[in-house]
Amino acid sequence: MPLTNSLRDDILAAVPSLRAFAISLSGNADRADDLVQETLLRALANIDSFQPGSNLPAWLFTILRNLFRSDYRKRRREVEDAEGNYAKTLKTQPSQNAHLEFEEFRTALDKLPQDQREALILVGASGFSYEDAASICGCAVGTIKSRVNRARSKLAALLYVDGAEDFGPDETVRAVIGGSGG
Amino acid sequence: MKDLKSQASKSTTPGKGGLTPEIQSRIGHQLRAMYDDVVRQGVPDRFAELIKKLDAPGGESRNENGAGGSNDNNGRD
């Protein structure tokens, strides 16, 4: 469809979540914004192929995700400055404690296989349905579900089993871990 | 959210991989906190301007005359 004013507004409205997706995927704010820019240029250049009434955010996320993956293949995350660079993008600097926790989370997220990371972000943070996430990633719904589950389990293992002391008193967590203190 | 609710009853039963509902909800919370931090930053000027610019009709040269006017002037006086 042609680029109407309302379509343009809808694209603009999707920019904040596109950026969040890009940063979550890449762990690098500068690279994320380049990805968003490239996504917008592609989207506008191919706006005729967008079906009116279909899910615009999902369409844009698909473009970004594919760009990221082709880019990823080329340069296997040469900049691994995940948390340092990301922290600079935050408007409000988290408190020391929260910041540590955040860095741990970010580091753990980066340890996930890419398939699992993107599935978890799409479903757990972007709020897409399993169906939309499957269409964005070009795979079956069941595949997305199992990727999300594996991502959660792996994060749990990385964050809440090995480094459980970092999270303060939480009886349930401690009970699960078995209270084996060091 | 509905997933959490349905699992809440067996709250301390570890799922596979030690994934209790509490841990699952904690992961979800951190994931969204990370994500929403960026969302709240809104649209950087860079992108607003990009879209505005591309929205303007491509070339500014819109000369409507001359396109179809067959200049049939034989110039024979």
Image (spheres, helix red, strand yellow):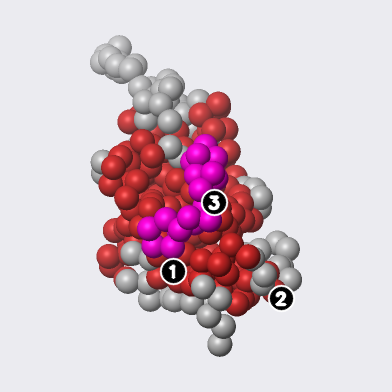
Magenta stretch holds residue B5? yes
**Where is the C terminus of chain A found, in terms of image quarters?**
bottom right
Read off the residue under disc 1.
A157
Chain at numbered mark 2: A
- Percent across and percent down for residue A51 are 36, 26
> Residue at left 60%, top 77%?
A165
Q: What residue would you read off at disc 3?
A: B11
Is residue A72 or residue B29 the one in the foreground? B29
Of the two numbered discs 1 and 2 on the same chain, state the one appearing first in sequence: 2
Residue A66 placement (x, y as % from top left):
32, 51
Residue B34 covered by magenta stretch: no
Q: Position of residue A89 (x, y in %)?
A: 62, 64
Using the image, name the chain to which the residue with label 3 belongs: B
Q: Is residue A145 above or below residue A164?
A: above
Residue denoted by label 2: A96
* Marks 1 & 3 on one chain: no
Give the vertical position of A28 relative to A124 (above or below).
below
Identify the image quadrant of the N terminus of chain A.
top left
Query: Which label sits in the foreground, 3 or 2?
Result: 3
Q: Is residue A83 above or below residue B2?
A: below
Which span of residues is magenta-colored?
Answer: B1-21
* Residue A138 visible in the shown view: no
Q: Residue at x 60, y 45 (%)?
A: B48
Three-letter residue code for mark 3? Ser
Left or right of residue A30: residue A44: left
**Residue located farthest toward the top when viewing the structure as drawn:** B77
